[in-house]
């Protein structure tokens, strides 16, 4: 078990929002709040309320002043209707391994998971709204999709809890013995599977915590993986792939 909390004690400026969502259509949309004296990893934005008559999203009047100030250039305005929508750093990470042996059979299993973190699902943010000016033939259609939305603006709609529990590794092995007159003294045959079972409600590519950010891949552009942003955890970018599930058959001979 491990748990941790990271607080930014000192910074070059008192506060900023960083980690651009990117193109098409959502440049200058910053996702992560960085503020002195507060936790790192705060996902920052307005709270989605519904869809207006023109297909644009509507947002909650968080401060109750009768006006909704939710434009991205107002993110740090004291009167803006923005709040922390989640945190990219998990509250708890855990792992458990177990080995069982029965006669010539053995089973090794490793489970792990994390709870308390959220992720910005950028696939949904770009490809759920049906926007006439963007000629995309591939739309994301999950249970979280809102019908009638024809305008893209980041909000709580695209922030998901990413708690997960997975069977990360499982090995089943069988040991075989041979007679004393055999050139082979023993043999072990094993089958190993990785990433076999993942239990999560997250709809993106991978519920694993994203502890650093490498920036946006605007319109399929090149990403600079040499410059990670450690102040912007919690973003599931469009260049992330689904975690692979692998199987390995092994044979060990003892002469």
Image: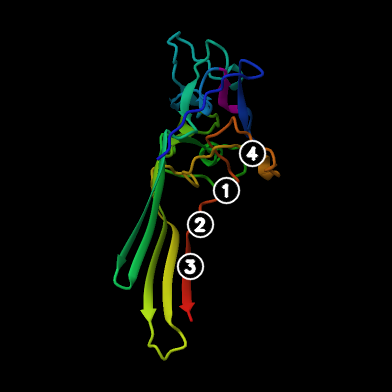
Q: Earlier in the sequence, mark 1 or mark 3?
A: 1
Q: Gap in Å between the C-alphas at discs 2 and 4?
A: 21 Å
Q: Give the range drawn in magenta.
A: 30-36
> Callout 3: 10 Å neighbours few (<14), some, many (20+)?
few
Q: Gap in Å between the C-alphas at discs 1 and 2?
A: 25 Å
- Frontmost residue, 14 versus 126: 14
Q: Earlier in the sequence, mark 2 or mark 4?
A: 4
Q: Which of marks 1 and 2 is in front?
A: 2
**Residue marked by disc 1:** 137
Q: Which of marks 4 and 3 is in front?
A: 3
> Callout 1: 10 Å neighbours few (<14), some, many (20+)?
few
Q: Nearer the viewer, mark 3 or mark 2?
A: 3
**Residue marked by disc 4:** 214
Q: Which residue is drawn at 43% across and 82% down?
A: 185
In this image, 146 relative to 79: left or right? Answer: left
In this image, 67 relative to 178: left or right? Answer: right
Element under label 4?
A: loop
Which numbered disc covers residue 248?
A: 3
Q: Nearer the viewer, mark 1 or mark 4?
A: 4
Element under label 3?
A: strand
**Residue marked by disc 2:** 244
Residue 84 is covered by the magenta coloring = no
Q: Which of marks 1 and 3 is in front?
A: 3
* Residue, far front: 180
């Amino acid at each position: 078990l491990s748990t941790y909390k990271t607080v930014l004690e000192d910074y070059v400026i008192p506060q900023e929002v960083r980690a651009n969502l990117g193109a098409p259509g959502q440049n200058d949309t910053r996702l992560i709040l960085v503020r002195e004296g507060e936790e790192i990893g705060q996902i920052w934005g307005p709270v989605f309320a519904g869809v207006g008559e023109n297909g644009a999203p509507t947002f909650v009047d968080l401060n109750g002043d009768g006006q909704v100030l939710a434009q991205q250039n107002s993110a740090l305005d004291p009167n803006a209707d923005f709040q922390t929508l989640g945190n990219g750093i998990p509250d708890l990470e855990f792992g458990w391994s177990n080995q069982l042996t029965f006669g010539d059979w053995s089973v090794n299993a490793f489970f792990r998971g994390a709870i308390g973190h959220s992720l910005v699902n950028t696939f949904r943010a770009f490809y759920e709204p049906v926007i006439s000016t963007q000629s995309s033939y591939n739309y994301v259609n999950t249970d979280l999709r809102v019908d009638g939305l024809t305008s893209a603006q980041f909000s709580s709609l695209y922030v998901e809890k990413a708690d997960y529990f997975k069977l990360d590794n499982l090995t089943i092995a069988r040991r075989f013995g041979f007679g004393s007159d055999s050139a082979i003294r023993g043999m072990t045959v094993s089958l190993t599977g990785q990433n076999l079972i993942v239990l999560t409600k997250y709809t993106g590519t991978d519920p694993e915590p994203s502890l650093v950010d490498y920036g946006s891949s605007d319109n399929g552009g090149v990403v600079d993986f040499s410059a990670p942003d450690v102040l912007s955890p919690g973003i599931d970018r469009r260049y992330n792939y689904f975690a692979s599930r692998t199987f390995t058959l092994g044979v060990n001979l003892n002469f």
